[in-house]
Amino acid sequence: MKYASTRTGAEAGAVETVFQGLAPDGGLYVPLISDEAATGFAKDCETLAGAERHVLARLFGDFPETVREAAVARLASRFPEGDPIPLVDADGFKILELFHGRTGAFKDVALSMLPVFMRHSAGGRRVLVLTATSGDTGSAAMQGFAGVDGTEIAVFFPNVGTSRVQRLQMTTPAAANVHAIAIKGNFDDAQAAVKRIFADKAIAAEAAAHGVALSSANSINTGRLVPQIGYYVLAAARLGGEFDVVVPSGNFGNILAAYYAKKLGAPVRRFIVASNVNDVLARFVKTGVYDPGEKFTVTNSPSMDIRKSSNVERLLWLMNDGDCAEVARLMADLAEKGRYELRDAAKERLFADFEGGVATPEETEAEMRRMRDACGYVLDPHTAVATHVARALGYPKGGVPCVIAATATPYKFPETCRRAFGADILDNPPPGFRELEALPVVQNKVVEVGAIDEAVRELF
């Protein structure tokens, strides 16, 4: 399988894309999927392991089968046996529970597998993995890479805005090769700094002089994006027919994975982007205009508190039929003008597949109460954004199942749950959550946004 950069079309193999993370020209790698890859789903895609093997064979075929099998085995070892990703009926929706991994978020799926791919792609080289997080990626990445030989990981997260549980999941890990660093800024600041560092040849040369290569665990890395496709293939195999999918969206990687599942043959009819009041993505899929604006709000769905979503660049490439010059133009407009607008043909393709909606913090908590009252199902605030948006847009429609991507366990957000329900109803926490409050905080570094570069250099 070949991959191409969104900016220049420069090609690379799957192994190289995992090691590099970001393409050298600043673009993101996209798989060049052939028609033969969309060959439907075998019976064994009804299991998570089978679905992942199906996707990896098509998109990560450059990795030896032994490496792919090791990644699938590591995933299985970190999720419950039997049904690690249940598809649950709740109040007319099909809830795809992606949160049964160690940190209680969908990121655990790919970040259980990425370290296996990273070690192979590094070929014995020492790798420093840089990661920006709005809350969930950081803890999942630290869990995934903790104790992995030849790797270190530095996670940058907002000093204000994460839930207490999210923060504890990042500040209590004691493995010597994991580092969580709070910044006096938001996720967009952290992501911009990490992407700039990847593009800085002087920093890369300095790292290389210390025997270190830089890579990423964010969804800009194909090693994050590709494994996420597997659970949408799983949903397709279990449902056996057409379905719509609603994804609470921040950095756009999760819903983009669903879109790639469709390119591999999954019969997804519509993709619904669910946003909180940081509604850049919902506005984009409704208008074809990407305009982050200046307004940033800290909400009760903090993993979606993002204004500049990296993975949209991959969607631009897809909506423009692989026209790299057009993608480069749009990204230049974003850098120079703070916004961009798709051409008419790209808008038509976007509107044909995507729609979006918004839930305010008040609507989010009301939806959490409504769903519990209606059927006893307790949602986390991000998933509540998705069900609120789905309901507001009239889903399910036309007898077609509506799959809601449940991206986190409510146990990650006890403060919001207490406020929404007026009481502490979370009485049976998953094992990894029970002792969290008792663990010592060992990651306590806080830096200004302008000091992120120096914090990275200290790890060379």
Image: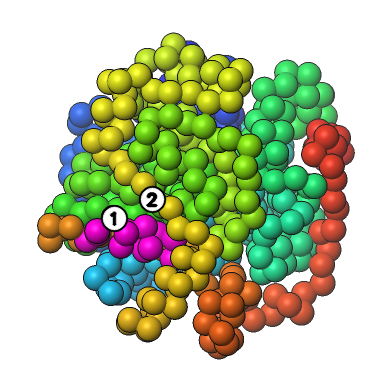
Let me know if residue 394 is in the magenta part.
Answer: yes
Look at the magenta stretch and give its main secondary structure: helix
Quarter location, residue 171 = bottom right
Q: In the rendered structure, which amino acid carries the disc numbered 2?
A: Gly
Query: Which is more N-terminal, label 2 or label 1?
Result: 2
| Residue 188 at least partly seen | yes
Q: Position of residue 276 (x, y in %)?
A: 50, 54
Q: Position of residue 246 (x, y in %)?
A: 34, 54
Q: Which mark is residue 328?
A: none
Residue type at tag 1:
Leu
Q: Which residue is mark 1?
A: 393
Q: How many numbered circles does the render carry? A: 2
**Quarter of the view holding residue 124:** top right
Question: The C terminus is located in which quarter?
Answer: top right
SS of the residue under disc 1: loop
Q: Is residue 284 above or below residue 94?
A: above
Q: CA distance from mark 1 to mark 2?
A: 8 Å
Query: Which residue is labeled 2 in the image?
Result: 357
Q: Examine the structure image and report whether residue 35 is included in the region drawn in magenta.
A: no
- Cβ–Cβ below 8 Å for labels 1 and 2? yes
Q: Nearer the viewer, residue 383 or 229?
A: 383
Q: Residue at x 24, y 59 (%)?
A: 395
Q: Secondary structure at mark 2?
A: strand
Give percent across and percent down for residue 427.
Answer: 55, 88
| Residue 431 shows in this picture | no
**Left or right, 107 with reference to 65:** right
Q: Is residue 416 left or right of residue 281?
A: right
